[in-house]
Amino acid sequence: MGEAAVPYLRYVALGDSQTEGLGDGDDTVGLRGWADRLAERLAEQNPGVRYANLAVRGRVAGQVRAEQLEPALALRPDLATVVAGVNDMLRPAFDADEVAGHLEAMFAALTGAGARVATLTFPDLAAVIPLARPVRSRVLALNDGIREAARRHGVVVAETYGHPVVTDPRLWSADRLHAAPLGHERIAAAVFQALGMPGGDDSWTLPLPPPPAGPPVRLLTTAAGELRWAGTFLGPWLRRRLRGGSSGDGRAAKRPDLLPVLSGQG
């Protein structure tokens, strides 16, 4: 398709580890992630698309606003995605209104500068991480805040909450905090559809094929798996928080400049 199919030429992504791409590649081979995948889909329809990714892992919504908004505005995007808030939800002192306020400030600034802005709602974390049941109410409250802020500023919302496939374990990496490659692919497809792009559809909501039949899962096995997960992933995360640290300490954006998405584009 030609340039008329994709009205966006300057795409800038703001956010935390999900937008950076954790769970889709690694720091050795490089991270891909849903924002990269979205940029690739846009570039398939218009090779002239340029893309910057300012996201940094571990950032809470206020940090995304403080550190990424001004650089994003300086790049003069005609399309921006803003996704943040999970790191806030997992902290003891969580205020859904405060987090939604930071997101709304970014929505207002970016749309005010002429950008089309897209965001998404978050899945029920308790369906992915049983130990996260206490934060279910936080997910609901933040999603409501995101929807209201988006409505006030004409921001596109990809509604990932409520679709059973979004909590399929095969869409999540081993830490269950970040999407696996297949999960990142589905998120990109959700945002692509929400933007009303040619070729976008709701196929991303379809369930995965049933897994191969295996032995029945015993309660003891499930409990042991939860304990292993807590020791391997939750424990280190909590220790960093107690020490006031973050997985993003000392890190910078992986793609701070608008660059061609496809090789060979000048």
Image (cartoon, grey):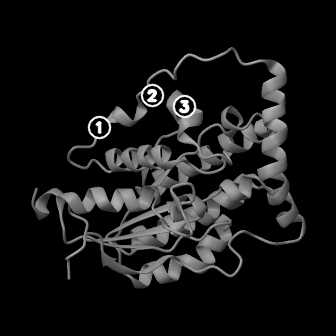
What's under tag 1, amino acid-wise?
A: Asp
The 10 Å Cα crowd at callout 2, few under 14, some 14 to 19, many 20 or more, is few
Residue at the spot x=56%, y=54% of the render? Answer: 23
The disc label shown at residue 201, or none: 1
**Residue hosting label 2:** 208
The 10 Å Cα crowd at callout 3, few under 14, some 14 to 19, many 20 or more, is few
- Asked whether disc 3 touches disc 1, contact meaning CB atoms under 8 Å apart, the reply is no
Q: Position of residue 49 (x, y in %)?
A: 25, 70
- State the quadrant of the N terminus: bottom left
Q: Position of residue 79 (x, y in %)?
A: 34, 66
Residue at the spot x=34%, y=33% of the render? Answer: 203
One can see residue 92 in this view: no
> Mark 3 vs mark 1: which is more N-terminal?
3
Q: Secondary structure at mark 2?
A: loop
Residue 211 vs residue 129, the one in the foreground: 211
One can see residue 101 in this view: yes
Mark 2 vs mark 3, foreground winner is: 2
How far apart marks 2 and 3 lie (CA) works out to 16 Å
User: Where on the picture, by quarter, is residue 77?
Assistant: bottom left
What's under tag 3, amino acid-wise?
A: Gly
Q: Position of residue 156 (x, y in %)?
A: 40, 52
Q: Image height check: is 121 above or below 62?
A: above
What's under tag 2, amino acid-wise?
A: Leu
Q: Is residue 34 left or right of residue 258?
A: right
How far apart marks 3 and 1 lie (CA) works out to 17 Å
- State the quadrant of the C terminus: bottom left
Q: Secondary structure at mark 1?
A: loop
Residue at the spot x=59%, y=62% of the render? Answer: 17
The disc label shown at residue 162, or none: 3
